[in-house]
Image (tube, helix red, strand yellow):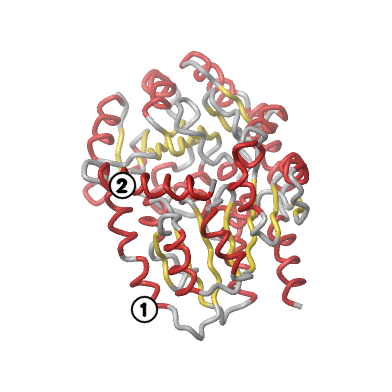
């Protein structure tokens, strides 16, 4: 099984290199991986004590960050190697302050694993959520290096729990401890004989809660919103646009402002979005040449880095990704500010969405008509809006504490 897996990785490497000739995102990854070993040689010496933090992409980084920060604070003399598999994570966080060096993770071949670990010799490795790379993990175990998996979620249809997944399953046993988000994941691990596990919850609750401790003011949003109510559309895709654009265009409520933060901020898409809006609209890229922001009804954030703060201005949020097949984005980011949340119809793989729908803080809609009815009710009914906002905020507060549980393990293992 190990042989077949490694052959598959080499084949995948060849396919990726060929596809990269026609795909700029894949090309970024191919070029970036060529630099990984040289960057590590420059940043890490043989005498350094190190943490290795690995994330698939940006979402996992945000999920792991509160743990990374806590470990760095507890052990400030350790150097941090931060690795990403996806360009969407690396390109955004290649200058992350938490790390001494940020690199692309090499493809999961036995030789790459040996060279990588020779260079960074981690005292502790932390993987986030879904990241299971058997050759790297087996090499960690062979060297008796400590590793943990945090915020893990498992489902019974995954290879770890099937007859054909023996090699993938064996990789789990390289972890000294696995912190799961829920009891079901812990039970699945117990069923295959892995017992070094505990339910810590989801570190994202701690991550988003930290947003309340910083200054969330944005000067241009202050001016734009003024004293009006605000609906923020976060990480929206074209499928999401089809749900809400008619509402904005046909709305007669002059005291409601709309902030749109598209997932895709390419100029061509932004131009298309603006062309579909029939109300006075401005984008972040036009700020320098604009005045009287308070006269605009829609503000398009065609930049990155502002969405978390923009949610603080919202009375109601729509979180994108669920209207199509791309995957629902993070509903916890607006929930921490205590507001009703609307999402698309595809949310089955997101337990926090299912929980908040059951509790009544989140509403799922499938059509523009359902969206219109839901948003009109929330805008016009202060009591409903306040009650749903209380539900989302209470949900966040009741699920904090994962970082404390994980750090207790690290402190005990160091004593």
Q: Which residue is mark 1?
A: 42
- Which element carries disc 1, helix, strand or loop? helix
Does the image show residue 393?
A: yes
Q: Residues within 10 Å of mark 1 (few under 14, many from 20)?
A: few
Residue 136 is situated, as x and y percent measured from the top left of the image, at 52, 60
Please tell me whether residue 355 is drawn above or below residue 252 in the rendered image.
below
Viewer-nearest of labels 1 and 2?
2
Does the image show residue 284?
A: no
Along the line of sight, the residue nearer the viewer: 65 or 121: 121
Which quarter of the picture shows residue 239? top left
The answer to whether residue 318 is left or right of residue 302 is right
Residue at point 66%, 49% (across, down): 202
Q: Which residue is mark 2?
A: 14
Residue farthest along the bottom direction in this orientation: 47
Q: Quadrant of the C terminus?
A: bottom right
Sooner in the amino-acid sequence: mark 1 or mark 2: 2
Q: CA distance from mark 1 to mark 2?
A: 28 Å
Along the line of sight, the residue nearer the viewer: 255 or 192: 192
Which quarter of the picture shows residue 350? top right
Residue at point 47%, 32% (across, down): 321
Please tell me whether residue 144 is drawn above or below residue 150 in the rendered image.
below
Residue at point 43%, 24% (across, down): 244
């Amino acid at each position: 099984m190990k042989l077949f897996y490694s052959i598959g990785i080499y084949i995948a490497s060849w396919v990726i290199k060929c596809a990269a000739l026609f795909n700029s995102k894949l090309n970024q990854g191919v070029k970036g991986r060529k630099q990984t070993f040289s960057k590590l040689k420059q940043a890490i010496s043989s005498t350094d004590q190190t943490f290795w933090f690995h994330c698939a992409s940006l979402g996992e980084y945000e999920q792991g960050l509160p743990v990374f920060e806590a470990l760095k604070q507890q052990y400030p003399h350790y150097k941090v190697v931060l690795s990403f598999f996806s360009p969407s994570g690396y390109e955004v966080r290649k200058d992350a302050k938490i790390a001494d060096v940020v690199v692309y993770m090499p493809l999961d071949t036995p030789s790459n694993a040996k060279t990588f670990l020779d260079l960074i010799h981690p005292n502790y490795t932390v993987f986030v959520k879904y990241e299971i790379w058997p050759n790297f993990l087996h090499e960690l175990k062979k060297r008796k290096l400590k590793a943990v998996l945090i915020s893990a979620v498992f489902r019974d249809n995954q290879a770890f729990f099937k007859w054909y997944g023996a090699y993938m399953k064996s990789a789990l046993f390289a972890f000294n401890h696995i912190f799961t988000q829920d009891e079901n994941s812990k039970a699945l691990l117990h069923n295959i004989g892995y017992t070094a596990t505990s339910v810590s919850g989801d570190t994202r609750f701690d991550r988003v809660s930290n947003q309340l401790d910083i200054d969330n003011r944005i000067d241009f949003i202050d001016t734009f919103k003024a004293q009006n109510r605000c609906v923020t559309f976060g990480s929206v895709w074209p499928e999401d646009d089809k749900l809400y654009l008619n509402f904005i265009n046909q709305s007669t409520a002059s005291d409601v402002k709309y902030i749109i933060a598209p997932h895709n901020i390419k100029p061509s898409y932004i131009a298309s979005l603006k062309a579909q809006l029939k109300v006075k609209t401005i984008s972040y890229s036009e700020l320098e040449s604009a005045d009287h922001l308070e006269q605009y009804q829609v503000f398009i954030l065609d930049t990155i880095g502002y969405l978390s703060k923009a949610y603080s201005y919202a009375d109601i949020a729509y979180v994108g990704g669920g209207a199509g097949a791309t995957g629902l984005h993070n509903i916890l980011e607006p929930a921490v500010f205590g507001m009703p949340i609307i999402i698309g119809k595809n949310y089955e793989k997101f337990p926090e969405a299912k929980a908040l729908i059951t509790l009544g803080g989140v509403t799922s809609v499938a059509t523009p008509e359902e969206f219109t009815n839901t948003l009109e009710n929330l805008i016009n009914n202060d009591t409903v809006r306040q009650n749903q906002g209380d539900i989302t905020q209470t949900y966040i507060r009741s699920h904090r504490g994962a970082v404390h549980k994980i750090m207790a393990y690290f402190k005990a293992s160091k004593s």
